[in-house]
Amino acid sequence: MTATWTRLLRSTPFRLALTFAFLFMLAFVLAGAIVYQMMSADLAEQLDDAIKETYSVIAATYADNDLKELVETVQSHSIRSTRKEQLFSLTDAAGNRIAGNFTAAGLPDGFSMFGAEMPGLPPDTEYRAYSGSVGANTLTIAFSLSETEELETIMLMSFGWATLIITGLAVTGGALLASRVQRRLDGIAATMVDVSHGRLDTRIPLTGKEDDIDIVSSQVNAALDRLSALVEGMKQVSADIAHDLKTPLNRLQMILE
C-alpha cells in the first residue's frame, strides 16, 4: 500500500491533478475572503441603518419639546430589551441619566464603539452606538454586535467546512484520475517491454475514447505494425537467400563426392 502511494505521488498525472487542485483551492479561498469582507461590510451597514432608524424614531417624539413623551419612549424601548441586546440612554447636560437601561458617558456624537460589562452578558460585550443631541439632552442608542459576530462566525465555519470538503474531493478526484491515467501509461510501458524482448505482436490496448493517450497509442501500434512487417520481410528474404544458396551447395557437394 505504501509503495502504491509512493508511486502515485511520483506520477506526473497525480502531480498535475494536485497542482490543479491547489490552484482551484487558492481561487476558492480568495473568492471566499472577498465574499466574507463584502458580507461583513453589508452587515455593518445594515446595523448602522437599524441604529440610525431607531434613533430617529425615538428622537421624533421630542418634536414638541415634550420631554415626558421622550422619556416614556426611551423607557418603553429599554423595558422591551430584556437581554440587553439594545441599550438606550437619555442623559441631561450634566451627564445624569434621565431614562434608559444604561448611562452613556464619554461617547462622541455620531457612531462609535464601546465595550460594556452587564449582568447576563459575556465580559467586554461590544456595542455599536449612535449619540446625538435632543434638545439639551443626549440620546444614545447602542446595538450589540453579538448577532453580527455570530453570523460572521457561522460564515467562517461554513466556509471552513466547505474548504475542507472541496479539498478532500479535489485530492480524491485527482488521485482517481491520476490512477486511471497511470494504469494506461503502465500499459504502454508494459507493451514496450514486451517489444524489447522480441514479442512484436504485442499491442497497446486502446480504450476507444480517442483522447490524447489513445491517439499516441494508435500511432505507436501503427509503428509496431510496420516494424513487425519489416522484420517478417527480413526473415522471408533471409529464408529465400538461404534456400537459393542451399541448392548450388548441394550440387557442388554431389560433384565432389
Image (cartoon, grey):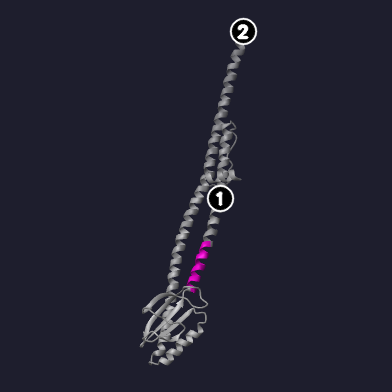
Q: Is residue 158 magenta?
A: yes
Snapshot quadrant of residue 129? bottom left
Which quadrant holds the N terminus?
top right
Residue to which mark 1 is pinned? 175
Q: Are marks 2 and 1 in contact (CB under 8 Å)?
A: no
Q: Residue 162: x and y, percent?
A: 53, 61
| Identity, as a three-letter code, of the amino acid under mark 2 | Ile
CA separation, marks 2 and 1? 76 Å
Q: Is residue 62 left or right of residue 147?
A: left
User: What residue is shown at x 58% (from left), y 19% (from top)?
Assistant: 242
Callout in the foreground (2, 1)? 1
Residue to which mark 2 is pinned? 255
Which quadrant holds the C terminus?
top right
Mark 1 Cα-neighbour bin, 10 Å: few <14, some 14–19, many ≥20: many
Q: Residue 109: x and y, percent?
A: 36, 79
Q: Residue 116: x and y, percent?
A: 45, 76
Give SS at disc 1. Answer: helix
Snapshot quadrant of residue 6? top right
| Identity, as a three-letter code, of the amino acid under mark 1 | Ala
Q: Is residue 155 magenta?
A: yes
Give the answer, above or below, for where 31 lies relative to 44. Answer: above
First in residue order: circle 2 vs circle 1: 1
User: What residue is shown at x 47% (from left), y 54% (from top)?
Assistant: 23
Please give the range of residues in magenta. Answer: 146-160
